[in-house]
Amino acid sequence: MEMAEDASENIVIVGGGICGLATALALHRKGIKSLVLERSESLRASGAAIIVHSNGWRALDQLGVASYLRQLTVPILSGQFHSLDDDKLQKLPVGKDELRCVKRIDLMTILADNLPQNSVRFGCNVLSVELDSTTSTPVLQLEDGTSLNAKVVIGCDGVNSTISHMMGVMPRNIFNICVVRGFTSYSSGHDFDSSFKMTKKNNVQVGLMPITTNLVYWFITGKYISQKFKISQQSHKVIRDITAGSVKDFPSSIKEMVENCSLESLHFSEYLRYQAPWDIVRRRFRDGTVTVAGDAMHAMTPFIAQGGSASLEDGVVLARCLAQKTSAGNLSGRVSKKMVEEALDEYLKERKPRVLRLSLQSYLFGKMHDTSSKFIKFICIVFLTLIFYDSHGHTRYDCGSL
Ligand SMILES: Cc1cc2nc3c(=O)[nH]c(=O)nc-3n(C[C@H](O)[C@H](O)[C@H](O)COP(=O)(O)OP(=O)(O)OC[C@H]3O[C@@H](n4cnc5c(N)ncnc54)[C@H](O)[C@@H]3O)c2cc1C
């Protein structure tokens, strides 16, 4: 096997998405160096934007990037749900805690910009990670034929994670719900105020949230699109036209928003993949000094808009645990494997109950949308009411200081 010249690192983070970059920055803030390996050639910010609740803002505050992102976004102060089926208007419970929508590229750029130079290696696809049979040191095999030894490997490689696969974890579960996301820009300002709006007709739901006074993020969920043809294989223009067709009976403000969207911002998710809540309970998520974070650990449906914020929290908690057990910055010194393992266990002990609740809540929402059985819908509502009677309680969570 060919060995790269620089074939040894302390902490390697696989995946430079929201979680990988946040984890690298959290470690950097604690004086701990890491290397992020990202298979894309540049920051991969597909999915247009991300809704960030107050728990996510707390994590961003810890990472030291919240004030910058606040300048790029407007706060969302109210919410409204409009069912066109029976023309009912309902208030959505937002406004008490901080809620904003951030362009993914803005979030990822500021996380990356705060890292030391050369912290992220682009175009670097990790094929596998194995523990050396004698030393138990993680060895990463890269697509370019080289290998890399690391003291610690953190898999932040998303929903199809190679690292969690190594631990026997795969989010194979899907809901047959598809989502189209995009932006629409309004040169003379939009009329949506600072309000999160959801509009529903039959099986189609349109959600929209302003990012600034000129830019609106929107998402459309339904089962309608994949029944027609494989939309993911179509051009952005065709995706826009199909999506516009699916909202033809919606108010003109929504139809125009879709028709005038930025084509490059469009992103289509054919299925919603998730890690089942019972898998989060069962799995260990650590093998030696290898662990996972973000979607690699807890892919969840987007109905409570928490996957990204939970990934930011993961980064903060993981860095804190590693720093506490290994005395910050000293990972290059004589830190034993046992100390690292203890730190990773602390991290998982703190994160598992948190992500279990998020995953269960988003699973019940997903199931409610996915099923056509009135009985299962009813059961989901009962569980949601009993377990999550405070439906926004999860947004008040505080992942603590770095
Ligand atoms: C439709 C939809 C809407 C959503 N809306 C919200 C929302 O409003 N708010 C919210 O908080 N969350 C939302 N989420 C969830 C959120 O997008 C994810 O939880 C978040 O992006 C997870 O970040 P991550 O870094 O763990 O994974 P990813 O963003 O998937 O990043 C993984 C990275 O790893 C890289 N990678 C993968 N494999 C390898 C490899 N072998 N080697 C090297 N690199 C690799 C990938 O290229 C990628 O850059 C939504 C999700 C969906 C599907």
Image (cartoon, grey):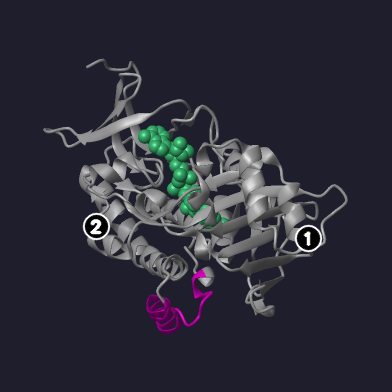
Is residue 353 shown to the viewer in this render? yes
Question: Observer-nearest residue: 94 or 27?
Answer: 94
**Residue visible at 65% across and 45% down?**
240
Ligand 1: does it lie within 8 Å of the C-beta at label 1? no
The reply to whether the magenta stretch includes residue 387 is yes
* Comparing labels 1 and 2, the label whose residue is closer to the camera: 1
Ligand 1: does it lie within 8 Å of the C-beta at label 2? no
Numbered mark located on residue 263 in the image: none
Residue 130, horizontal then vertical, whole percent: 21, 34
Residue 78, horizontal then vertical, whole percent: 71, 72
Q: Quadrant of the N terminus?
A: top left
Corner quadrant of residue 110: top right
Q: Secondary structure at mark 1?
A: helix
Numbered mark located on residue 283 in the image: 2
Among the two numbered marks 1 and 2 on one chain, the one whose residue lies closer to the N terminus:
1
User: How far apart are the two marked residues, 1 and 2, measured between alpha carbons?
Assistant: 48 Å
Corner quadrant of residue 52: bottom right
Q: Amino acid at mark 1?
A: Ser
Q: Is residue 24 left or right of residue 290?
A: right
Is residue 19 shown to the viewer in this render? no
Residue 288, horizontal then vertical, whole percent: 21, 45
Above-or-below relation of 333 to 175:
above
Per the image, the residue denoted by label 1 is 252
Report the predominant secondary structure element of the magenta stretch. Answer: helix
* Magenta range: 374-394
